[in-house]
């Protein structure tokens, strides 16, 4: 085994060299080693897998990438219980050098709560930056194994959440594939796992996760701090941890195989999973109720998990179901996937909240805030039947902005307000805008983004067996990335060279 795959972090490197690091070379070296780990996993050579994981987690390049991931994340501004942030190049380099297995003791995560849609609160753990970097480092070695083992069966990989190169659009594309035909399954088991991240069995993780067991045990036993008091953790992985999604995915691998084995043949059983949310299709309600669901309950129980009675139900495709913010339903035998009513309502509430909170804000600053939200939302739903929805969202935006203008200028005439805040552009006569100066100092217009301007395009679902850690798919992912980049930039009016 060679140990010269990765370039070392030279001891003579000046502290300011962080900004001069050749990240392309470092990333390429780490990826090559990850591919070797994945190859050894496919061959069942677990001794070599362990040796290569050890080599990767002790390499300088992987440590640099781990720290880079932490300091590039928006959460870099949020400290853990130690209150430490990494802001300077020297601090980042020192952090990379400090990632040592020997003497490592993770600190408790800082517990906060975020609101859920149902009014309840979800606990979220915030590890220290050092612990996040250690998780990112271990994940570099674990992820090739996790991707290679993900739901292995003759039907491909059907889990899409928190996995590299996969997205919610792929999950929805798979829903279309298994439900769109006339002879497709008519019944759907909508599954939701109760507090998945908080309840995964520690013994199960220790017995089944192929990573450094010493590090894993320390993570699971680190506990959390709330209002200055440290509490132990007897189950679960902390929500907010970088490696937690991968651990949860590995705990749920095999769900489709269990569902298929439980049902008789030719029952059209398919599983589409995104993290801890999943659907299972079936030819009859009885099979899903009496065969598949009990098998899933047993499968989850072995891992310390259980289904949520509140969110788990069996639905006919003609009645439709919501999944990942989309509504999937057949209308007179034709499958249509649209943004769900709940997703539309939630988005408009967030938009109205932003507008109301910025009564005294400069118009251009408000437009920048809104454009960021509108582009992201439209991009998420642009692969489904959403054109009319985009138009309705734009109409609601217009009404909210008229109210915003009226609050700012209660004594101005309607004509003055229109001339001040709206302009004509092509066939559009009510374009909300602000006058700004570009980089050259020239006055130009900053327009509010129009959701209806986004073209609806069919998403090309990822190949089931494709993984970024198999060199056979390197060209495939390169072509896919280029196509996605061209597609995204084209509807934003930007030109991309072929």
Image: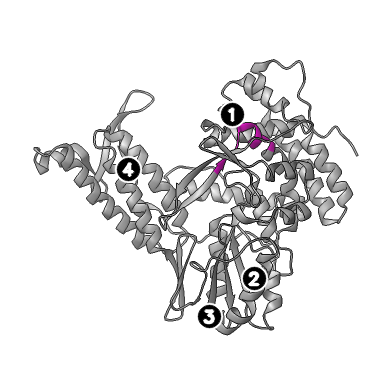
Give the quadrant of the N terminus: top right
- Front-most of residues 363 and 53: 53
Element at label 4: helix
- Residue 202 rendering spot, x and y as whole percentages: 70, 53
Q: Quadrant of residue 160?
A: bottom right
Residue marked by disc 1: 82
Residue marked by disc 2: 296
Left or right: 334 as drawn, with respect to 438:
right
Please give the range of residues in magenta: 125-134
- Front-most of residues 200 and 489: 200
- Is 187 covered by the magenta stretch? no
Residue 428 circle label? none
- Is 131 covered by the magenta stretch? yes
Q: Is residue 232 visible?
A: yes
Residue marked by disc 3: 186
Element at label 1: loop
Q: Residues within 10 Å of mark 2 (few under 14, many from 20)?
A: some
Residue marked by disc 4: 354
Estimate the spatial distance between the alpha carbons at disc 1 and disc 4, rounded to whole Å: 32 Å
Q: Residues within 10 Å of mark 3 (few under 14, many from 20)?
A: some
Q: Residues within 10 Å of mark 4 (few under 14, many from 20)?
A: some
């Amino acid at each position: 085994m060679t140990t010269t795959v990765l370039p070392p972090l030279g001891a003579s490197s000046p502290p300011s060299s962080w900004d001069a690091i050749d990240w392309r070379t470092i990333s390429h070296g780490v990826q090559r080693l990850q591919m070797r780990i994945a190859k050894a996993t496919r061959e069942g050579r677990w001794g070599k897998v362990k040796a290569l994981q050890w080599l990767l987690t002790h390499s300088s390049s992987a440590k640099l990438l781990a720290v880079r991931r932490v300091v590039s994340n928006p959460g870099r501004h949020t400290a853990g219980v130690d209150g430490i942030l990494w802001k300077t190049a020297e601090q980042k380099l020192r952090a990379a050098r400090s990632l040592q297995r020997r003497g490592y003791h993770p600190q408790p995560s800082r517990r906060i709560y975020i609101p859920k849609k149902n009014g309840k609160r979800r606990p979220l753990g915030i590890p220290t930056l050092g612990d996040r970097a250690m998780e990112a480092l271990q994940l570099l070695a674990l992820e090739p194994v996790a991707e290679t083992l993900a739901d292995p069966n003759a039907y491909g990989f059907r889990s899409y959440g928190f996995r590299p190169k996969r997205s919610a659009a792929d999950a929805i594309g798979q829903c279309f594939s298994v439900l769109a035909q006339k002879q497709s399954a008519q019944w759907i088991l909508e599954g939701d796992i109760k507090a998945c991240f908080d309840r995964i069995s520690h013994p199960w993780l220790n017995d089944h996760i192929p990573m450094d067991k010493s590090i894993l045990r320390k993570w699971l036993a680190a506990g959390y701090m709330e209002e200055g008091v440290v509490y132990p953790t007897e189950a679960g992985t902390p929500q907010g941890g970088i490696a937690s999604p991968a651990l949860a995915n590995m705990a749920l691998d095999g769900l489709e195989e269990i569902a298929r084995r439980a049902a008789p043949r030719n029952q059209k059983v398919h599983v589409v999973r995104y993290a801890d949310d999943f659907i299972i299709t079936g030819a009859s309600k009885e099979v899903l109720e009496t065969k598949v669901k009990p098998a899933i309950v047993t499968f989850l129980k072995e891992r310390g998990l259980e289904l949520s009675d509140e969110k788990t139900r069996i639905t006919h495709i003609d009645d439709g179901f919501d999944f990942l913010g989309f509504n999937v339903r057949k209308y007179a035998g034709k499958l249509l996937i649209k943004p769900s009513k709940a997703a539309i309502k939630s988005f408009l509430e967030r938009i109205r909240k932003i507008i109301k909170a910025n009564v005294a804000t400069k118009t251009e600053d408000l437009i920048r805030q809104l454009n960021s939200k509108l582009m992201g939302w439209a991009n998420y739903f642009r692969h489904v039947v959403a054109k009319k929805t985009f138009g309705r969202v734009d109409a609601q935006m217009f009404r909210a902005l008229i109210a915003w203008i009226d609050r700012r200028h209660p004594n101005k005439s309607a004509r003055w307000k229109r001339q001040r805040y709206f302009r004509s552009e092509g066939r559009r006569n009510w374009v909300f805008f602000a006058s700004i100066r570009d980089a050259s100092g020239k006055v130009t217009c900053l327009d509010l983004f129009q959701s209806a301007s986004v073209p609806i395009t069919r998403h090309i679902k990822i190949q089931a067996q494709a993984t970024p850690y198999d060199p056979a798919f390197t060209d495939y992912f390169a072509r896919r990335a280029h196509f996605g980049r061209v597609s995204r930039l084209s509807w934003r009016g930007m030109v991309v060279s072929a």
